[in-house]
Amino acid sequence: MSIQCIIQTIKSYDTIIIHRHVRPDPDAVGSQAGLKEIIRRSFPDKNVYIAGEGDSSLDFLASMDGIDDHTYKGALVIACDTANAARIDDQRYNMGEKLIKIDHHPEVDSYGDVMWVDTSASSTCEMIYDLCQHAKNDGFVFSDEAARLIYAGIVGDTGRFLFPSTTKKTFQHAAELVTYNFDRPNLYDGIYNIKENIAKLQGYILQQFELSGSGLSTVKLTKELMDKYRVSPNETGQLVGVLGNIEGIKAWVLFIEEEDIIRVRLRSKGPAINEIAAKYNGGGHPMASGATVETWEETDKVIKDLNQVCLNYKA
């Protein structure tokens, strides 16, 4: 069984480096940092690190470690919440001795020496909690800090338990996690509070959005527009859900212009959009995915594909 194999592999390594996907969300950081906390508490003599570029909006959860190349020699590397190897943040992940993949997305890339992929899980954090529960007899221990991180990831990836991925097990895990001592209101503030400039750009989007006859809504955030509102591309993750409660929308897409690419953030209330994401250098869940294109002309192709998916969708 993959879980038991992962448990034994973790126990056998002295140095463990945990990665996650680029442009992280609470589940990515929560699973990564939560697993680190569990391993460090369980085995204080192990050296455990978390790798990747820092994101100021998630500093309230955890800060990344500085790791030199030499540390990877003979190390176990674990990639959390990342469907394809190309999206692992810090491509030194392949410099370790052994690689484990732990993920809940539909499988895009079968990388790693050991893989545990569970698409029925609401989040990778839910899987990390499962791992710890299975590993109690192997000396794994859970802590208040681990509970804070794991709960944050579950809340983030289920949209506060609103998304269809939320299951009976998700609620059971959440009920157990809230018995630990951490500040839930403060955690929710960290995930959902937004700055004034973000709120103003949200207002602009709500005033300007249009809904096509297919049920698709499209938002284009150019460099010029983001500069006007003093919003960085990394901060646009806080805008992706802004259209989610509008009646009549089946799916929506945000195009975010960066230095050399255009980031594509896809969301849906029904039509499966992950195959479209995969077509444009991305992937993800049927209702929440991401992709990239190189030109505004290419965004028109994405819109055409999304319109067709929405037209074909029968609720």
Image (cartoon, rainbow, N blue to C red):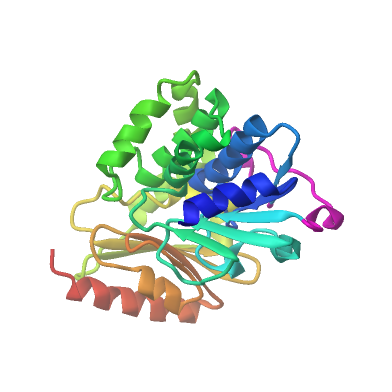
**Percent of width and height locating residue 131:** 48, 43
Along the line of sight, which residue is nearer the eye, 28 or 293? 28
The quadrant holding residue 260 is bottom right
Please determine whether, in this image, residue 68 is positioned above or below residue 278. Answer: above
Residue closest to the eye, 230 or 20: 20
Which image quarter is the C terminus in? bottom left
In the image, 160: left or right of 136? left
Is-magenta flag for residue 69? yes
Task: Reply above or below: 261 against 97.
Answer: below
Q: In this view, does 46 lie above or below 205?
A: above
Tell me which residue sits at (71%, 49%) in the image. 13
Left or right of 249 on screen, residue 42:
right
Please tell me which residue lies in front, 123 or 199: 123
Outermost residue on the left side: it is 315
Q: In the drawing, does residue 167 fall left or right of residue 22?
A: left
- Quadrant location of the N terminus in the rendered image: bottom left
Image coords of residue 147 (percent x, y)? 49, 29
Q: Which residue is drawn at 42% across and 71% down?
A: 277
* Span colored in magenta: 52-74
Residue 61 is one of the magenta-drawn residues:
yes
User: Does the image show residue 56?
Assistant: yes
